[in-house]
Image (cartoon, rainbow, N blue to C red):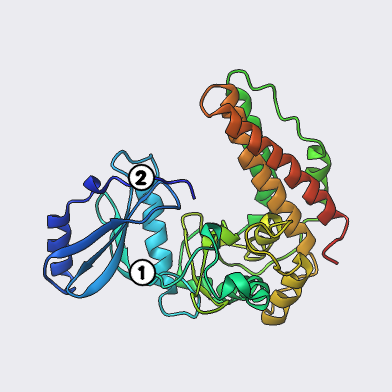
C-alpha cells in the first residue's frame, strides 16, 4: 500500500464512454471521478455512469515494461472467477486487445484492515479472531476452483521443483548491482538445502493468488467475512498450498493492527477442515514462502547499495528478510505440527 497520488489525466474519459456504449453499459455523463489510493503503481479510479458505480484499473501513464501483460492476466483471472464462490472483485468488462489494457470492475463494499478497523471490528475481539479464520476460508475456496477454467495459464508441471533454483538464481543476479557485497543472510544455505531435501512428492494444481496476505484482503463492513481478495497480478496455476504458506509467512507475529487474530496453527487447522488437500507438508510451504519473500525483499536492499533505492528502505527490508529466515527456521522446527 504505497501509492499516494493518482494521475487521472492518464484516462481519456470521452473514449471510455464510447467504449462502454459499444458494450451496452448504461450511458450518460461520467461523474464522481475520484482516485482510489493504495495498492500497486497501476491507476485505479472510481466513477459513476448511468447510475452505476465502477472502478477502472489501468497502467500508469508511463507504464512499466510488463504493466499491460499483468493487467491482461488479472482481467482473465477475474473473468474466470466471476461465476465462483471466491470473493473477488466482480469484473464488468475488459479491453485487452490493444494497449493500454484496462478493465472495469464493481466497487467492493468493504475495508482493508491495514488502514484501520471500523466498528464493530475495532471493539469486538470475536470478530477480529474470526477475520483470520475467514482469510483461511477464502483461500480454501480459491483452492477448490478447477484450474481448467484458465487453460494455458502458468506452468504447473514441475512447479515446486523450480522454486528453490529460481529464487537462488534471482539472489545471484543481485551481484550485478554495483556496491552490493552479497547476501548476509544467516541460515540461507541450510534453508535452501532443507527445502530441496523435503520437497513434497506430489501436489494438485490449482489457481494461486501469488501474494496472499492480510493487506490484500478487504473485509465486510458489518462482520468478519472476506469481501474480496484483491491485487491478482501475481496469480498463476501452481500449488495453492504455497498461498497458505505465504499467509503463514506474513502473518502478523504481534497481530499488528488487528489484535486477537488466530495463531498460525489454528489457520492451518481451519483450512484443513475446509479442503481436501494434503496438509501434511504445510511446514515446507511456510518455509518456502519465507525463503522466496526474503529473497525478493533482499533485492531492494541490493538496489540500495547501487543507489537505485533509498538506503533506509533497503535497510528495513533487509531486517525483514532476516526475520523471515528466522521464521523459516521455526517452521522447519515443526511449530505448525
Q: Secondary structure at mark 2?
A: loop
Where does the C terminus fall, quadrant-wise? bottom right
For the residues carrying marks 2 and 1, which lies nearer the camera in this image? Answer: 2
The residue lying toward the viewer, choosing from 271 and 117, is 117
Quadrant housing residue 116: bottom right
Which numbered circle lies on residue 5?
2
Which numbered circle lies on residue 107?
1
> Image check: 161 left or right of 100?
right
Q: Residue at x 75, y 30 (%)?
A: 184
Name the spot of residue 252 as percent of width and height, x first. Answer: 69, 57
- Can residue 139 be seen? no
> Image check: 326 left or right of 98?
right
Q: Residue at x 61, y 41 (%)?
A: 296
Q: Residue at x 56, y 21 (%)?
A: 306
Tell me if residue 14 comes above or below residue 122 in the rendering: above
* Residue at the far front in the pictured view: 123
Name the spot of residue 149 as percent of width and height, x first. Answer: 46, 72
Tell me if residue 326 comes above or below residue 251 in the rendering: above
- Number of labels in the image equals 2
Q: Residue at x 79, y 60 (%)?
A: 283
Tell me if residue 158 comes above or below residue 308 in the rendering: below
Which numbered circle lies on residue 242?
none
* Residue at the far top in the pictured view: 179
- Can residue 61 be seen? yes
Name the spot of residue 166 as percent of width and height, x first. Answer: 64, 43
The residues bearing labels 2 and 1 have C-alpha atoms spaced at a distance of: 19 Å
The residue lying toward the viewer, choosing from 215 and 126, is 126
Name the spot of residue 284 as percent of width and height, x first. Answer: 77, 58
Tell me the crowding category of disc 2: few under 14, some 14 to 19, or many 20 or more residues within 10 angstroms, Cα based.
Answer: few
Q: Earlier in the sequence, mark 2 or mark 1?
A: 2
The residue lying toward the viewer, choosing from 216 and 274, is 216
* Residue at the far right in the pictured view: 333
Amino acid at each position: 500500500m504505497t501509492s499516494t497520488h493518482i494521475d487521472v489525466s492518464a484516462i481519456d474519459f470521452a473514449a471510455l464512454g464510447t467504449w462502454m456504449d459499444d458494450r451496452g453499459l448504461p450511458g450518460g455523463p461520467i461523474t464522481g471521478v475520484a482516485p482510489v489510493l493504495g495498492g500497486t503503481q497501476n491507476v485505479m479510479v472510481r466513477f459513476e455512469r448511468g447510475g452505476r458505480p465502477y472502478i477502472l484499473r489501468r497502467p500508469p501513464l508511463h507504464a512499466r515494461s510488463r504493466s499491460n501483460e499483468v493487467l491482461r492476466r488479472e482481467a482473465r483471472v477475474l473473468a474466470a472467477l466471476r461465476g465462483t464462490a471466491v470473493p473477488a472483485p466482480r469484473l464488468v468488462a475488459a479491453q485487452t486487445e490493444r494497449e493500454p489494457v484496462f478493465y472495469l470492475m464493481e466497487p467492493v463494499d468493504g475495508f482493508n484492515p491495514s488502514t484501520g478497523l471500523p466498528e464493530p471490528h475495532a471493539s469486538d475481539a470475536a470478530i477480529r479472531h474470526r477475520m483470520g479464520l475467514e482469510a483461511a476460508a477464502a483461500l480454501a475456496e480459491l483452492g477448490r476452483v478447477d484450474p481448467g477454467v484458465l487453460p494455458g495459464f502458468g506452468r504447473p508441471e514441475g512447479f515446486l521443483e523450480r522454486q528453490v533454483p529460481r529464487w537462488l538464481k534471482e539472489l545471484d543476479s543481485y551481484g550485478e548491482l554495483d556496491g552490493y557485497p552479497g547476501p548476509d543472510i544467516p541460515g540461507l544455505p541450510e534453508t535452501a538445502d532443507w527445502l530441496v531435501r523435503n520437497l513434497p512428492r506430489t501436489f494438485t494444481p490449482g489457481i494461486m493468488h501469488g501474494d496472499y496476505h492480510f493487506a490484500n484482503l478487504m473485509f465486510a463492513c458489518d462482520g468478519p467475512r472476506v469481501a474480496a481478495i484483491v491485487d491478482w497480478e501475481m496469480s498463476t496455476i501452481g500449488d495453492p498450498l504455497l498461498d497458505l504458506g505465504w499467509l503463514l509467512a506474513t502473518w502478523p507475529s504481534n497481530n499488528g493492527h488487528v489484535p486477537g487474530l488466530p495463531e498460525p496453527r489454528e489457520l492451518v487447522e481451519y483450512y484443513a477442515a475446509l479442503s481436501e488437500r494434503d496438509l501434511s507438508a504445510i511446514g515446507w510451504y511456510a518455509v518456502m514462502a519465507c525463503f522466496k519473500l526474503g529473497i525478493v525483499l533482499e533485492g531492494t536492499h541490493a538496489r540500495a547499495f547501487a543507489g537505485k533505492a533509498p538506503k533506509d528502505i533497503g535497510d528495513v527490508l533487509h531486517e525483514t528478510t532476516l526475520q523471515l529466515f528466522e521464521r523459516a527456521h521455526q517452521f522447519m522446527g515443526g511449530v505448525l505440527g
